[in-house]
Amino acid sequence: MEIIADLHIHGRFSRATSKQLTIENLEKYARIKGVNLMGTGDFTHPEWIKELKQALADDGTGIFRTKSGYPFVLQTELSLIYTDLGRGRKVHNIVLAPDFDVVSQITEYLLTKGRIDYDGRPIFKIPCHEFVESLRKISDKIEVIPAHCWTPHFGLFGSESGYDKIEDAFKDQTKHIHALETGLSSDPPMNWRISALDKYALVSNSDLHSFWPWRLGREATLLDIKLSYDNILKALKTKEGLNGTLEFWPHEGKYHFSGHRACNVCLSPKESIKVKDICPVCGRTLTVGVAERVEELADRPEGFKPECAKPFKNLIPLSELIAGMIKSSVATKKVWIEYNKLVKVFKNEMNILLNVDEVELKKVTSEKIAEIIIKNRKQELIVKPGYDGVYGEPVFDKNEMKKEKVLITKGNIQQKSISDFSQ
């Protein structure tokens, strides 16, 4: 059975997370979603690690299971904020660990650098290369993956505080970096435009802050392996057994296009470059989005696909599809009724999004909802791009899209012109 893995999450002790984020709820909604392997999130937090030790047991392969058998991998995310090469850097990294003993040693090391009790994703003034070197002295089975690597403020390549090259951040420890997390605002084709990234496995995860199915598994990594911690590492290091990824539409990510939220300005790379990243309304500096940052670093044209490329699929979560069709908010009772009706018949959301044919769908739900599920699967939907911390939005009403003067479909982008803002 193909493993649908979400290996970057958070527990309830991280900032801005649901207080109901428990292992029990994560397992419940992962099964509903159709995600069959999860990261634990936040293993350095003293309260969360207590709960992990109570809820999970090593099955002998480095995979930690609940009493009912659901599998987790020990995982956390750490924020490294420091000065390097003449400017401030803010880089988030995912860390995977093979067992609780190694987790304890990681925690002991971090305690020599600062506190761990105030947030599930604590901050340390440790340069990336020093961080990797120190962890590898603890265990060569620790894996470090740059998180949401294009996000402006906290990504490895982020426009606000990142680097232009992996080697600049990780220096002599670059040889120990094997995978990069694409993040919500980028997808594989955007990363394929940088030839230096070809050797890295591209992985995707939700970075969830709540367990609801429109968050959990909204991005995931597909593995074809016999499940064990060592085999996960092998897939990351060699790409063998790495079947590809399930991706958010990058346009739906909060930092896909450049813009200024306060002025409701959202610009494509072409337009933001034209105004030299200055807001055409107020004159302040724009937050440079992922699309523009990729354009800046790319050495290949848009649409290039390397021979080593793994398959991927952009998917909008089922709850959002239903909400769009019945014109309701995603967490309403009406959406849940329709969602649960589909899941009851077809087992889980991923099966519905990826496999169930239209004829079978129409036996359970409305024709409109069945059709939108198939359009989603065929990558035929339209998404209005996110910018400067504002999520993008799927647009189901074509008239509304025309009114907004924004059209994104199959990679063809037309965006508001500068003149639209010069009122």
Image (cartoon, rainbow, N blue to C red):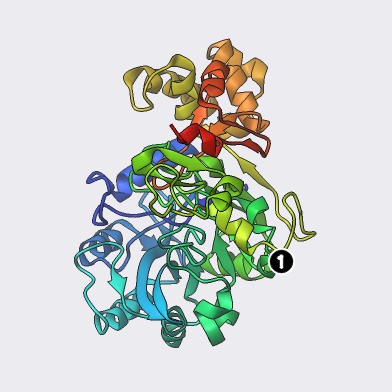
The residue drawn where x is 48% and y is 58% is 148
Whether residue 74 sits left or right of residue 298 in the image: it is left
Please name the amino acid that badge 1 sits on.
Ser
- Furthest toward the front, the residue is 423
Q: As rendered, which of 196 and 94 lies closer to the eye?
A: 196
Q: As rendered, which of 48 and 153 lies closer to the eye?
A: 153
The residue drawn where x is 60% and y is 57% is 294
Q: How many marks?
A: 1
The image quadrant where one finds the C terminus is top left
Q: As rendered, which of 84 and 284 lies closer to the eye?
A: 284
Q: Which residue is mark 1?
A: 195
The location of residue 12, given as percent across then percent down, is 26, 52
Q: Residues within 10 Å of mark 1 (few under 14, many from 20)?
A: few
Q: Is residue 364 depicted above or below 131 in this figure?
A: above
From where the camera sits, is residue 407 visible? yes
The location of residue 331, given as percent across then percent down, is 34, 27
The residue drawn where x is 29% and y is 70% is 123
Whether residue 345 sits left or right of residue 296 in the image: it is left
The location of residue 312, given as percent across then percent down, is 66, 47
From where the camera sits, is residue 203 visible? no
- Callout 1: helix, strand or loop? helix
Q: Is residue 52 depicted above or below 319 in this figure?
A: below
The location of residue 227, given as percent across then percent down, is 56, 59
